[in-house]
Image (cartoon, helix red, strand yellow):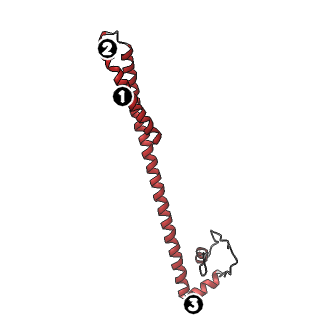
Amino acid sequence: MGPGEFCGEFALLSNAPADATATALEASELLEIPYNKFNKLSFSQPAVLINVIRALSAKLRDTNLKFSDLIDDMIQRNRLTAIGMTASKIIHDIKTPLTVISLTVSLIAVWPLVPATAGAAAKAGPCVRQIRRIERQTHRSDKAA
C-alpha cells in the first residue's frame, strides 16, 4: 500500500471485525475511523462512500483476475499431468504386446528343430532386433513422460 490508500473497508462497511491484518514496514501515519463516524461521514459526504466503493471494486476486480489466472494455471498443470499419465499408459500398453511378441519370437528362435518353426527361426533374429529398438524408443518416451 502507498500514501492515500486504505485497508479495512470490508470491516468498515459491514460493521464486523476485520478478516485480515496489515503491518506497516516503515513509519506511517494512520487514521482509524470508527464505524459510527464513517456512517455519518458517508451520509454527509457521499463522495467518501463512493471512493471507498470504487477502491473496494478495484480490489475485488484485481482479486478476481489473480484467482482466474491461478485457476488457469491449475487447469494447465492438470492437463499436462493428464497428458503425461495418458502417454505413460499408452507406452505401457505398447510395451505389453511387445513383450509377448518378443518372448514368442525368442522361443521360435531357440526351437529350430520343430518342423513348423524351422523357416520362422531364420527370421527371428531381425525381428528380435526390431522389437528391441522399439522397446528402447518406448523406454525413452516413458522416461520423458
Q: Circle 2: is it few (<14), some (14-19), or many (20+) Cα within 10 Å?
A: some
Q: Where is mark 2, residue-wise?
A: 117
Q: Quadrant of the N terminus?
A: bottom right
Q: For this view, does 105 lie left or right of residue 6?
A: left
76 vs 60: above or below: above
User: Which kind of residue does numbered mark 1 sit on?
Assistant: Gln
User: Which residue is pictured at 62% across the width and 73% down the height?
Assistant: 16
Please, what secondary structure does the residue beneath circle 3 have?
helix
Q: Is residue 59 above or below residue 67?
A: below
On the picture, is 26 further left or further right than 49?
right
Q: Earlier in the sequence, mark 2 or mark 1?
A: 2
Q: Earlier in the sequence, mark 3 or mark 2?
A: 3
Q: Which residue is mark 1?
A: 130
Q: Left or right: 127 with respect to 43?
A: left
Q: Amino acid at mark 2?
A: Thr
| Mark found first going from the N terminus, 1 or 3 | 3
The local crowd at label 1, few if under 14, some if 14 to 19, many if 20 or more residues have their Cα within 10 Å, is few
Q: Which residue is mark 3?
A: 44
- Using the numbered discs, state the Cα–Cα distance from disc 2 to disc 1 in whole angstroms: 19 Å
